[in-house]
Amino acid sequence: MNMSIKINSPSRLHLGFIELDKAAPRNFGSLGLTISKFKNVIQIKESKNYEIVSKNEYVKLKINDVFEKFKKKFFFKPFRIEVHETTPSHVGLGSGTQLALTVGLLISEFHNLKLSFNDIVKISGRGLRSGVGIESFNNGGFIVDCGKGNMTTIPPVFFRTEWPNKWKIILILDDSFKGLSGNDEKKQFDIISKIDPSISMVNSQTLLMNIIPSIIENNFTNFCKGIQIIQENMSRVFYNDEKKFASKRVEKIFNFLSKKKIMGYGQSSWGPSGFIFCENVKKRNQLLIDLKKYMKYSELDDLTFEKVDGRNQGCIKT
């Protein structure tokens, strides 16, 4: 019987950084949420030749990049990788990390390399700034990592908990826009000028004394207030304006929410994807009706709303 392994790995929302001042002794520190939609499903099989089967040429290139990194360290028998589903690229949902870790784990398991998960992360070249995508792959849920110091290789997870099942999410996709990634993302981080130290102080206090206790205590209102503070500070750092976001279309949706005094929305990573947290299914359905009316009135197009849940499980291997 031919050997075959399949992995289903999730997408994630990146909800913000705590410390982006390069002069600080420890940088970054992230919070994020694993989500139910846009999973990766990739399979590895025995083959006479090395093959990557995917309709997406960019995905094939990224898989080959991971293969080359492992090939420098190990000798392999031929194999075939089949891509059944992938997360959309460059929209802020962590596609690069999930793809790299999925392929890395498949190669390690298929060839019985006996690598630890951290070994796979390092060889794949992930975790340069955030540990949220790594922990999403590993365990899912709502995640906070402690950033990177001079000696850090992979940002350690500070806090991980289950996302409340009643809390729902609306994902906003701008079909006309691609966000930053890779070298472009690195350049953007490099040009961030000196940051007001009060921002990291407020972020840290908000995370520790508002966001974390609120999700533990199921206090949806306070949780959303905390997320809003972090998101506004990210906009100040990246765009010099607390109300500005990557996609102008998504920004208009957020302005609409702000006028209605709704909190708990923002941009995932570099965007353009946006998210809105909703207290329950009923409130999400009503908000979707209001958003679609607003879109029609404002003649907004190229936006898609997706109903999404939190995912409290990491990758699934079969």
Image: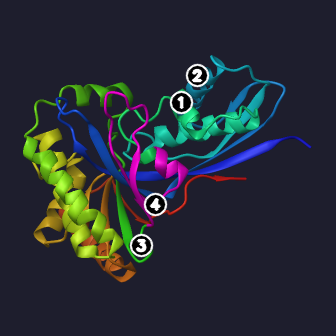
Which residue is identified by label 4?
Answer: 141
* Place of residue 105 in the rendered image (x, y in percent of width and height, measured from the top left): 64, 39
Which residue is identified by label 2?
Answer: 69
Which of 6 and 141 lies nearest the eye of the viewer?
141
* Place of residue 242 in the rendered image (x, y in percent of width and height, measured from the top left): 11, 50
Q: Quick one: label 4 or label 2, which is nearer the N terminus?
A: 2
Is 228 drawn above or below residue 85 in the view shown? Answer: below
Which of 77 and 134 lies nearest the eye of the viewer?
134
Give yes or no for contact between labels 1 and 2 (Cβ–Cβ under 8 Å): yes
* Place of residue 114 in the rendered image (x, y in percent of width and height, measured from the top left): 70, 35
Give yes or no for contact between labels 4 and 1 (Cβ–Cβ under 8 Å): no
Image quadrant where one finds the N terminus: top right
From the viewer's perspective, is 262 left or right of 176?
left
Question: Disc 3 residue type?
Answer: Pro
Q: Quick one: label 3 or label 1, which is nearer the N terminus?
A: 1
Which residue is located at x 54 percent, y 50 percent?
A: 138
Question: Disc 1 residue type?
Answer: Ser
Q: Label 2's element?
A: helix
From the viewer's perspective, is 193 left or right of 112?
left
Give yes or no for contact between labels 3 and 1 (Cβ–Cβ under 8 Å): no
Which residue is located at x 42 percent, y 31 percent?
A: 153
Which residue is identified by label 3?
Answer: 164
Q: Quick one: label 3 or label 2, which is nearer the N terminus?
A: 2
3D distance between C-alphas at marks 4 and 1: 22 Å
Label 4 crowd (10 A; few <14 / some 14-19 / many >=20): many
